[in-house]
Image (tube, grey):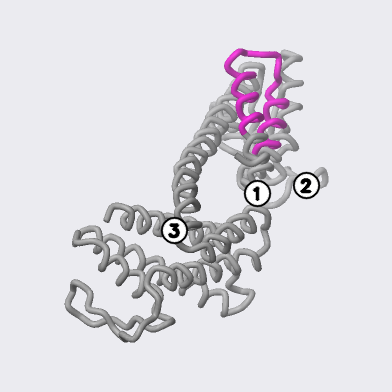
């Protein structure tokens, strides 16, 4: 688990602890904790929401419905005050009068004139302020719970991947040290870097690793083609590393279902790596994302893991 993930879990669990055990944490304090959490995880929409609640809404169009209050004439006001101010108004126990306005799409500034929008007024008191703050607290809790589930589920997936990685690393180091060394380097480089160049290099490294694996398990020989169980000839020259791995699997198992599964996995992986390579060659407007780089590495590990386990059985 990365330090960033550990810190996010720590903040999220502290937020839940404060809310569930009704500690003396104000809604404003909870919002600050939540802001720290979503900033750490780069959740831009949630960062914007937390900032609006902490600083107040500058655009009426951005004010959420839980801040809406309606009068007897069915005209409404959207309370744009920041959370700290609402907490302060709640403590006074007083009622505050708000002008009902049609929501303009312009920023709310001190110089903004509301006279053309005034239709009536709404009296907002302690119960209203309490309900807004209570809704905010509930939202913070449910949003935090969802984030915590995402993080922990992601960790669960990572644990499963780590098991496969250990198997692949152990067996690959025996069968093909060259591919093992490159796979380890690609994994470590991706963990350390967030540059698009590193992401592109990961995709390229995975193609090289598959070719090294093909060279070790089914080296190029005199034969130019092999007949798959579909009865059709397939080229097995130096650049046909996917086909050579498929040929290796075919020679080492009699199970048609196993061969079909590995073949389809390899073809998918080969096409995926090729599409990533083609994307990278277009230029900077089509940069490789970290998600794509992660998928390249994970798929390569998983497919090699399946092949190695299959070869061990036969």
Of helix, strand and loop, which one carries label 2?
A: loop
- According to the picture, the residue beneath numbered tag 2 turns out to be 112
Image location of residue 276, percent across then percent down: 50, 71
The foreground one among 237 and 131 is 237
Q: Residue at x 68, y 42 (%)?
A: 40
Query: In the image, is residue 178 above or below residue 94?
Result: below
Q: Can residue 102 be seen in this view?
A: no
Q: Can residue 109 be seen in this view?
A: yes
The disc at residue 218 is none
Image location of residue 303, percent across then percent down: 39, 59
Quadrant where the N terminus lies?
top right
Magenta range is 9-37
Of helix, strand and loop, which one carries label 3?
A: helix
Evaluate if marks 2 and 1 touch, with contact meaning CB atoms under 8 Å apart.
Answer: yes
* Sequence-first tag of 3 and 2: 2
- According to the picture, the residue beneath numbered tag 3 turns out to be 299
- According to the picture, the residue beneath numbered tag 1 turns out to be 104
Q: Is the stretch drawn in magenta largely helix, strand or loop?
A: helix
């Amino acid at each position: 688990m990365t330090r960033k993930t550990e810190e996010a879990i720590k903040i999220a669990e502290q937020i839940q602890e404060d809310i569930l055990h009704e500690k003396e944490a104000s809604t404003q304090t909870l919002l600050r904790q939540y802001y720290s959490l979503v900033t750490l995880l780069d959740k831009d929409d949630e960062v914007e929401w937390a900032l609006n609640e902490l600083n107040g809404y500058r655009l009426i169009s951005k004010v959420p419905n839980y801040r809406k209050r309606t009068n007897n004439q069915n005209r409404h006001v959207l309370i744009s005050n920041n959370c700290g101010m609402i907490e302060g108004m709640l403590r006074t126990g007083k009622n505050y009068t708000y002008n009902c306005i049609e929501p303009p799409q312009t920023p709310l500034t001190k110089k903004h004139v509301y006279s053309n929008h005034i239709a009536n007024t709404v009296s907002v008191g302690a119960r209203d302020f309490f309900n807004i703050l209570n809704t905010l607290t509930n939202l913070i809790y449910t949003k935090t719970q969802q984030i915590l589930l995402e993080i922990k589920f992601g960790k669960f997936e990572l644990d499963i991947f780590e098991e496969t990685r250990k198997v692949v690393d152990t067996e690959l180091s025996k069968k093909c040290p060259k591919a093992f060394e490159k796979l380890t380097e690609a994994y470590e480089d991706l963990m350390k870097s967030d540059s698009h160049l590193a992401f592109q290099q990961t995709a390229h490294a995975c193609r090289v690793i598959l070719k090294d694996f093909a060279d070790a398990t089914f080296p190029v020989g005199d034969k130019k083609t092999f007949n798959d169980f579909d009865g059709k000839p397939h080229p097995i020259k130096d650049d046909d590393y996917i086909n050579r791995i498929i040929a290796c699997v075919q020679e080492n198992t009699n199970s048609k279902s196993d061969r079909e599964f590995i073949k389809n996995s390899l073809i998918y992986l080969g096409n995926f790596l090729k599409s990533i390579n083609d994307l990278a060659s277009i230029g900077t407007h089509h940069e490789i994302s970290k998600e794509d780089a992660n998928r390249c590495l994970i798929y390569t590990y998983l497919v090699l893991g399946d092949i190695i386990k299959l070869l061990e059985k036969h």
